[in-house]
């Protein structure tokens, strides 16, 4: 009888499930060509398309031994609920890392204010979904957004998750006071560090398939 080895389920702590639809469509271009394709895809997705696509991704994760996923989600609130449905359908634990997006990107990514963002987060959380706070990046979130979201995460003891280091041109769009001092590090003065998870996504240095927008 063959010996077996049991392992704990893997955790995918940073997923952009909708980008599965870009597989095989962006070969040969640079980051910026990829980003344009990604934005065009994101702009046209309906909640039902999100649900169907995410079910595919999550089933692939389950088949590969993953039991939990952190979905870094910035497609909008109805689509957040669609992601929750997809995880339930595929049988994977979900932490919805709802992205705060104050500027740039697409209109559907953005909230009007930190209060607007927190109200969306609370709506999702009130339905029983595990959530984490995800200020998208120092480019997409002004400093006051980072500070207010950081305070909320600390008070509620919720995960705080951020793209800490983007492609250099994107970092250049941040104000000087917000640019990371070093690769992968972000230290706004009042953003607590203890429950913080940073995803370093600089195109030149990345080694895993995580890119940001
Ligand atoms: Zn990412």
Image: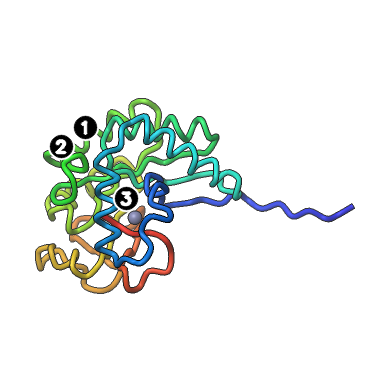
Q: Give the Cα distance between marks 2 and 1.
A: 6 Å
Residue 25 falls in image quadrant: bottom left
Q: Is residue 195 rendered to the left or right of residue 190?
A: right
Please tell me which residue is depicted at 28% across the width and 44% down the height of the picture: 42
- Could you tell me if the residues under marks 2 and 1 are in contact, i.e. CB atoms within 8 Å? yes
What residue occupies the far right of the structure in this picture? Answer: 1
Q: Which residue is mark 2?
A: 115
Q: Give the Cα distance between marks 1 and 3.
A: 16 Å
SS category of the residue bearing label 1: helix
Count neighbours of disc 3 (C-alpha within 10 A) and say few if under 14, some if 14 to 19, many if 20 or more: many
Please tell me which residue is depicted at 19% across the width and 56% down the height of the picture: 190
Q: Which residue is mark 1?
A: 119
In the picture shown, does residue 151 fall above or below 163?
A: above
- Could you tell me if the residues under marks 2 and 3 are in contact, i.e. CB atoms within 8 Å? no
Instruction: Out of 84 and 118, give the one closest to the viewer.
Output: 84
SS category of the residue bearing label 2: helix
């Amino acid at each position: 009888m063959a010996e077996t080895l049991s392992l704990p389920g893997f955790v995918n702590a940073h997923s952009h499930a909708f980008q599965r639809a870009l597989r095989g469509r962006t070969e040969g271009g640079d980051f910026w060509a990829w980003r344009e394709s990604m934005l065009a895809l994101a702009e046209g997705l309906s909640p039902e398309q999100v649900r169907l696509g995410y079910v595919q991704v999550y089933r692939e994760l389950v088949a590969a031994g993953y039991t939990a996923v952190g979905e870094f989600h910035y497609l909008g609130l109805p689509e957040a609920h669609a992601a929750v449905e997809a995880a339930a359908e595929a049988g994977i634990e979900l932490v919805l890392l709802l992205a705060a997006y104050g500027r740039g990107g697409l209109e559907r990514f953005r909230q009007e204010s930190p209060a607007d963002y927190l109200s969306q987060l609370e709506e999702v959380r009130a339905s029983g979904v595990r959530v984490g706070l995800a200020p998208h990046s120092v480019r997409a979130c002004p400093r006051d957004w980072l500070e207010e979201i950081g305070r909320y995460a600390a008070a509620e003891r919720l995960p705080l998750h951020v793209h800490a280091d983007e492609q250099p041109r994107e970092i250049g769009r941040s104000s000087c006071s917000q640019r990371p001092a070093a690769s992968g590090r972000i230290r706004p003065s009042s953003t607590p560090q203890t429950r913080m998870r940073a995803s370093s996504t600089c195109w030149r240095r990345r080694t895993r398939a995580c890119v940001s927008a």
